[in-house]
Amino acid sequence: MSFNAGYGLNSVSTDQAPRLHAYLNDPDTEAEESWMMGASEAADDWCRSNWGKIPGTYAAHCRNWGDHTTTTSKIHRCWNKEIVKPMIHDLEAPWNRHVIEMKAFLETRRDGLEECFEKAMRSIIALKNDVPFDREGFSSVQTLITTLLNRKAMLCTETLGIMNEFQNAVVELGNTSLLSSVRTSFIGKYMKSTYEKAAEANGDGLYQRLKELINGKVKQNPDLFNNIRLQLEDEYRKLTLDAGTKIQASNEKHFRAIRTALDILRTKNAAVEGERNSTFRDRMRKQVLDAQPILRKIEECIAK
């Protein structure tokens, strides 16, 4: 196989963040305008509907973060959900497509890492066959080779764990922050301070002041949905950078140990066996030297 930047594990940041931006900005500005229109219509409906004309019911929604079921008619409405309903309708499909592509991206990188290592280790493992079992160097060589294989296994396992952690965090980001109406969602955090002010309000003219508070928050920010998309991209970018940093740290730790093991294999054991078997010494040096540039290539690919 040939080496290329396509197997770069750290490119989870440089590759995936721009892809998400393209997906989220595929709808043009008219989409945001329609989302704002839908949110404004929802806010108007809260005031026009029969239950919305009842001050106590409207106030109950404010006290319950916009999520309330009336006692008598059992009508349930979630204001946060109604505000973002048009946006979710338009963004849910592109977000899900991005998640599917992201999973495929990570699987490709994981498989590429395994394949690169298999090629690099092949020539090193071949050394086992060059050391007679009864030679004193056999145990040492076997131990060093085992160390290399263990480090390879640990690096791949850690990388897979980081990828799974990143993948789960991305899915959670979409399900909780973007595509839901819970208090910790983007829209929930946006409305939080207004619900709190409304819950604390009292005195004469309360009903009118509550409507002004809620309507003002929903209607008077033309950048509401653009800001939500920017928040999503920012949180996603943080996740990709964190994953890349963890992969790089794992890479550096294990490759440092691999390089040390290769140096010992090339020098110490070559010296011991070389005194009695120059053919073995030369072959071992060649196998190790052949493996080193391949390992360097893996490091470069991971770092990209």
Image (cartoon, rainbow, N blue to C red):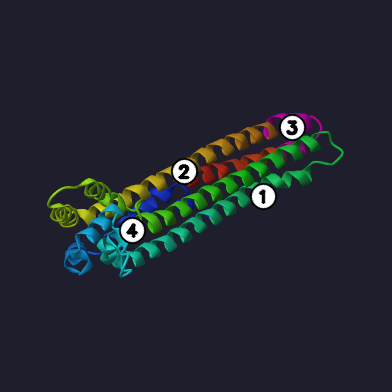
**In this picture, is 144 found above or below 160?**
above
Specify which label sits upstream in the sequence, 2 or 3. 3
Disc number lying in front (2 or 1): 2
Give the structural element (helix, strand or loop) at label 4.
loop
Residues packed near mark 3 inside 10 Å, few (<14), some (14 to 19) or many (20 plus): some
Report whether 155 appears left or right of 86. right
**Identity of the residue drawn at 35% across and 65% down:** 92
**In this picture, is 71 found above or below 6?**
below
Specify which label sits upstream in the sequence, 3 or 4. 4
Residues rendered magenta in the picture:
266-282
Give the structural element (helix, strand or loop) at label 3.
helix
Query: What's the amino acid at mark 4?
Result: Ser
Q: Quadrant of residue 25?
A: bottom left
State the CA–CA distance, disc 1 to disc 3.
19 Å
Instruction: Check residue 269 in the rendering and tell me which mark sits there, or answer none.
Output: 3
- Which residue matches tag 4? 181
Query: What's the amino acid at mark 1?
Result: Arg
Instruction: Check residue 122 in the rendering and tell me which mark sits there, or answer none.
Output: 1
Residue 175 % position (x, y): 40, 58
**Identity of the residue drawn at 28% across and 65% down:** 85
Disc number lying in front (4 or 2): 4
